[in-house]
Image: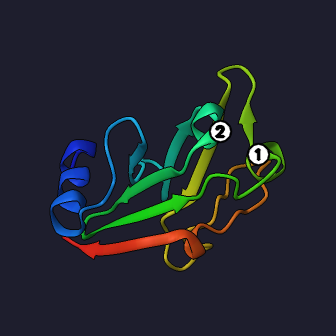
Amino acid sequence: MNTKKESIQILVDEFRAPLNNRNTSFSNINVSKNVWWINIAPLKFENDVNILLHSMDEIIWICLPKGFTNDLSSVFKIRNDKNVVDLEISSDKKYKYLIDIKSGGTEFDFAPYIIKSISI
């Protein structure tokens, strides 16, 4: 299982990706459900948001560009108790792959925002 640091380093080394610990969110596939689960502070959306999704055989780099939406709460579920964007991105290639399936979400499709998908 790759860590966030290792995944960032792979993309930096191979593609000179402008990724670092502060501007990148990371998730492995959840052990109890076929999703990548991520919480991201809404303030991070004031800039480009980089997301690395790690599976057994690939790393998917997604970038949501600054200003991709004017209303974050209309696109994603925001947990008021923690003030985070709460994502559950389907990792099931047979069911809503790369779509936010979080209850209360809008089924946002991350596929158009893929920058790179690399086999590892």
Q: Tell me if residue 33 can be seen.
A: no
Query: Is tag 1's residue or tag 2's residue first in the polypeptide sequence?
Result: 1
The numbered dot on residue 85 is 2
Look at mark 1 in the image and give the residue it sits on: 72
Q: For the C terminus, give its image quadrant.
A: bottom left
Q: Residue at x 81, y 50 (%)?
A: 70
Q: Nearer the viewer, residue 4 or 11?
A: 11
Query: Is 87 left or right of 32, judged from the image as shown?
Result: right
Depth order, front residue of 25/103: 25
> Could you say where residue 3 lies in the image, as x and y percent from the top left?
23, 45
Q: Are marks 1 and 2 in contact (CB under 8 Å)?
A: yes
Counting from the top left corner in percent of width and height, residue 108 is at 70, 63
Label 1 is placed on what type of residue? Leu
- Relative image position of residue 50 (x, y in whole percent): 46, 52
Q: In the picture, residue 113 is in which quadrant?
A: bottom right
Pick the front one: 88 or 12: 12
- Secondary structure beneath label 2: strand
Q: Name the residue rendered at 30%, 60% in the picture.
A: 17
Is residue 56 visible to us here?
yes
